[in-house]
């Protein structure tokens, strides 16, 4: 009942809220509405990662979930300070470029296509220089991690360690 009548606010300067209910919205239970919204946000973030990184969907679905403390690198070799996110998905590694002027963010996963066994592989997510913004792919991956982290305890057997988890609810037909 708390979700009945809920509407996203409109950001100053925008014509309307970023998301509005579809015509069949009233036919869904509050649980189904939340699941649908989570899926919409997850799918949008997944598209950003897939496009920015160039991985196949099945490789993306094979990424491990969970986060780890972030060691914020600076190009002078020290640790960066500031208001950057303090954790990243555990499949992300930061390293200095060969020149030492850029911090590279690498996504670690596995290639499945034409392989007998999954083969470890790394994709470049992007780079940043001191004081620069994190790549969009990292931000999108962090959104997915934040959405799925609390759901892992409800995950279908065997999928609890994955980045993207599926869960079953008896109330949801």
Image (cartoon, rainbow, N blue to C red):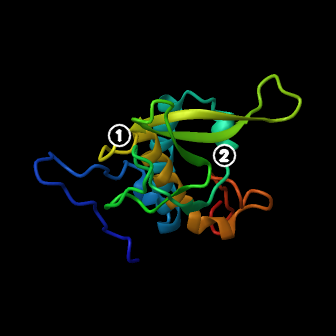
Residue at figure coordinates x 19%, y 55% from the top left: 10
Query: Which circle, 2 or 1, is nearer the viewer?
Result: 1
The residue at the far left in this view is 13
Residue at figure coordinates x 42%, y 57% from the top left: 79
Q: Is residue 83 left or right of residue 50?
A: left
Q: Can residue 170 be seen in the rendering of this structure?
A: no
> How many numbered marks are there?
2
Residue at figure coordinates x 67%, y 61% from the top left: 167
The residue at the far top in this view is 114
- Choose top left, top right, bottom left or bottom right for residue 154: bottom right
Q: Is residue 100 left or right of residue 11?
A: right
Q: Secondary structure at mark 1?
A: loop
Residue 111 on image: x %, y %: 73, 31
> Please, is residue 4 above or below residue 114 in the view?
below
Q: Are marks 2 and 1 in contact (CB under 8 Å)?
A: no
Q: Is residue 173 left or right of residue 89?
A: right
- Dot 2 alpha-carbon crowd within 10 angstroms: few under 14, some 14 to 19, many 20 or more: some
**Which residue has dot 2 on it?**
63
- Dot 1 alpha-carbon crowd within 10 angstroms: few under 14, some 14 to 19, many 20 or more: some
Q: Is residue 65 left or right of residue 41?
A: right
Residue 37 on image: x %, y %: 45, 55
> Please, is residue 42 above or below residue 54 in the view?
below
The front one of 66 and 121 is 121
Residue 49 on image: x %, y %: 50, 37
The front one of 16 and 46 is 46
- Choose top left, top right, bottom left or bottom right for residue 153: bottom right
**Which residue has dot 1 on it?**
129
The front one of 89 and 166 is 89
């Amino acid at each position: 009942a708390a979700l009945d009548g809920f509407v996203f606010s409109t950001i100053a300067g925008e014509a309307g809220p970023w998301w509005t209910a579809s015509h069949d919205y009233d036919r869904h239970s509050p649980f189904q509405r939340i699941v649908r919204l989570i899926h919409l946000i997850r799918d949008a973030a997944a598209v950003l990662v897939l496009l920015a990184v160039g991985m196949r969907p099945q490789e993306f679905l094979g990424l491990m979930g969970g986060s780890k403390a972030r060691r914020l690198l600076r190009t002078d070799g020290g640790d960066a300070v500031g208001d950057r996110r303090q954790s990243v998905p555990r499949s992300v590694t930061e390293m200095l470029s060969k020149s030492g002027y850029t911090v590279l963010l690498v996504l670690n996963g596995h290639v499945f296509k034409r392989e007998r066994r999954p083969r470890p592989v790394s994709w470049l997510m992007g780079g940043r220089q001191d004081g620069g913004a994190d790549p969009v792919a990292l931000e999108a991956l962090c959104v997915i991690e934040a959405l799925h982290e609390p759901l892992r305890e409800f995950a279908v057997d065997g999928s609890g360690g994955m980045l993207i988890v599926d869960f079953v609810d008896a109330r949801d037909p």
